Amino acid sequence: MPPNFQSGATLDTRPAEKKLKDYKFKEIVAAANPVNWVEKSESEWRKFPEQNQDGSGSCVEQTVRKLAGIQAFLKEKQYVEFSAGFYQLRSNKPQSGMIGVEAFDIWMNSGIPLEVLVESDNMNDAQMDDIQIEQYEKDIAKVFAISGHVGIDNGDFETVASVIQANGHSSSRQSKVRISLSKLVRDILLPQLTLSSTMERNTFLSKIRHTLAASRAISSAKSSSRRVTGLPAIQ
């Protein structure tokens, strides 16, 4: 490892009583299913868009961002570009790096924003901390919140592989409840957008239509709908 190497995954400094509330895979499953290892050529690998954290310590939040996009792909067969902008919600800000479990707690409690609205690529720590996230962008982020997360002990590669084997395939089941574009715009966006100029409003709505049409991954949030259930989180 290079002498100046610094990991963005910081030590879990949460109080002991808070750690006791974490859900562990080994506590809810008697044993992981055996892994069926299959060798594949590179042409058969499943690949997703690259992300660039520009030397920032946001790798944990970048991982959550990628996991959310893959989850959308598995559910809707469309990859969604989410944002790492909620990196600024970390408890150790402005220090670099992030607690792994905390990143998933933020996803569960606050959701995850769309990259088209909250740009986060090619930014250092200071730039990411300075991102101005509007209330309507936070409201949209909550649509993509997960209902919970489950931790796997560090170094347990076989269990990680088993979870991926069990969950890492496209599902033909569709979300039982969706938010239509018209409902999303009417109930969440328009109250904010009425304060903007017509040109700004039309530009924004154009972005939203393009993003939602491509993703088809809108599931309803909390009071008006059911939440998206995420894959067990790897801590």
Image (spheres, rainbow, N blue to C red):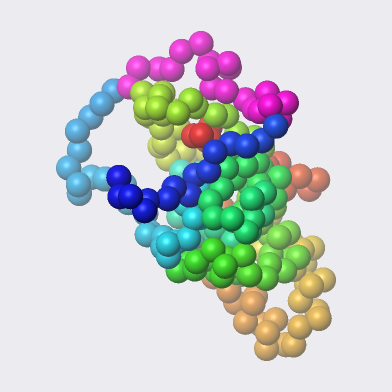
Of 140 and 51, the residue lying toward us: 51
Residue 66 point in image, percent of width and height? 46, 51
Query: Is 224 left, or right, of 124 in this rendering?
Result: right
Where are the magenta residues, as a range? Answer: 16-35
Query: Is 166 left, or right, of 205 in this rendering?
Result: left
Seen at 65% across and 75% down, the residue is 205
Residue 148 point in image, percent of width and height? 64, 35
Whether 162 is drawn above or below 63: the answer is above
Secondary structure, magenta segment, majority class = loop
Whether 111 is drawn above or below 184: the answer is above
Q: Is residue 138 visible?
A: yes
Seen at 43% across and 65% down, the residue is 54
Whether 64 is drawn above or below 80: the answer is above
Residue 209 point in image, percent of width and height? 59, 70
Give the quadrant of residue 129: bottom right
Looking at this view, name the residue that lies furthest to the front: 3
Residue 33: say if magenta: yes
Seen at 20% across and 38% down, the residue is 40
Quarter occupied by the N terminus = top left
Give the quadrant of residue 163: top left
Of 207 and 101, the residue lying toward us: 101
Give the quadrant of residue 166: top left
Residue 216 point in image, percent of width and height? 55, 56
Query: Is 61 left, or right, of 140 in this rendering?
Result: left
Whether 37 is drawn above or below 224: the answer is above
Q: How many marks?
A: 0
Residue 87: say if magenta: no
